Image (tube, rainbow, N blue to C red):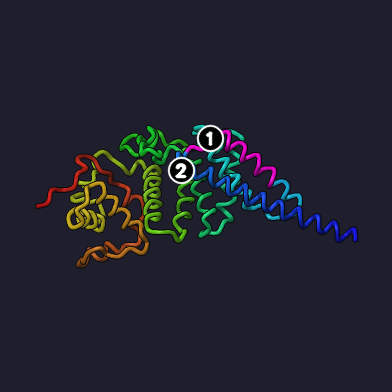
Amino acid sequence: MVGEVRRGEDGAGAAARQRELAEALQEAHRLLDDPSGRPPAEALVAMTDRLGRLETALAQHGEDFAGCFVVRGLVLGAYCLNRGERTSSGSGSAERTEALRRLRWTDRHGPTDNPLTVQARMMLVFLLAPWALPRGDGTTTVLRDALLTPGQGEDLLTESVRRDLTEAKEVVHRIAEAPFDAEFQQRTADVQQVLERMLAPGLLSSGTTAEAVATDPAAPDGERDAFHHHLTAGGLAPPDALRAAQSWMLDPHRRLPFPLDEPLRHDAARSDLHQPHHWAAFTHQGNPAPAWRS
């Protein structure tokens, strides 16, 4: 009889913990999805403490706490971003160190197509290189612009910056494997391109503009033709045409967007076009407007 009562109490306790966990996770996601992009710091701290208590209780009773573990990492990451931590991954606050630990664990063990895994990987990239991505209002940081400016990046690419960018690039590659929609894939590819360019600043020179792709003999014929195609037939502005050509080169399953004769067909099918020394060697300078068409 005593054993039956104890089992009943344990079952009721487990059910109560699961209800509290569900409520806490729901509230945490509401915080993380704050429309302003900056949830209140005090709310993030309170949620971190609440999830910590729940995680401890679940672990003590031998119950699954993986979801709580990951979401607490997301909340800690949001807290660090809100207060503007911009240090390398080898330094920073205890909260940032703990957030990185949890997010890296999720990156290593989470299923590719799990939305929570993808969210954790995105937060990991934000923490590793918060200055490398555009802000919510579309503006960019001075360091990001400098690393993408010909002739400046090499001096700024310190060992710690290179380490964090390299890890971020690898994480973004895994994000790209998630089977999400085309818009998500395009945004991910754009981030990959930016990180690749930052890690190869020596390949950018002040003389290699988008317009130079059309005549520079160092550019692969495939890139020149893809650029011309998007610039003329596609009617895109030069920077957009260049990005479209680079995205095409980075696609391992790319198809020719237009008919080509040999040897250009062979050149466009090369397996090494995704290498930075091919696609990252050019940047746009000058008039960003589309070419005039009659």
Q: Is residue 39 magenta?
A: yes
- The image quadrant that residue 110 belongs to is bottom right
Amino acid found under the numbered disc labelled 1: Pro
Numbered marks: total: 2
The answer to whether residue 31 is left or right of residue 255 is right
Amino acid found under the numbered disc labelled 2: Leu
Residue at point 65%, 50% (across, down): 21
Give the image location of residue 280, x and y in percent: 32, 48
The residue singled out by tag 1 in the image is: 40
The crowd level at tag 2 (other Cα within 10 Å; few <14, some 14-19, many 20+) is many
* Dominant secondary structure, magenta: helix
Mark in front: 2 vs 1? 1
Q: Which residues are magenta?
A: 38-54
Instruction: Report if residue 154 is visible in the image.
Output: no
Residue at point 58%, 46% (across, down): 27
The residue singled out by tag 2 in the image is: 165
The crowd level at tag 1 (other Cα within 10 Å; few <14, some 14-19, many 20+) is few
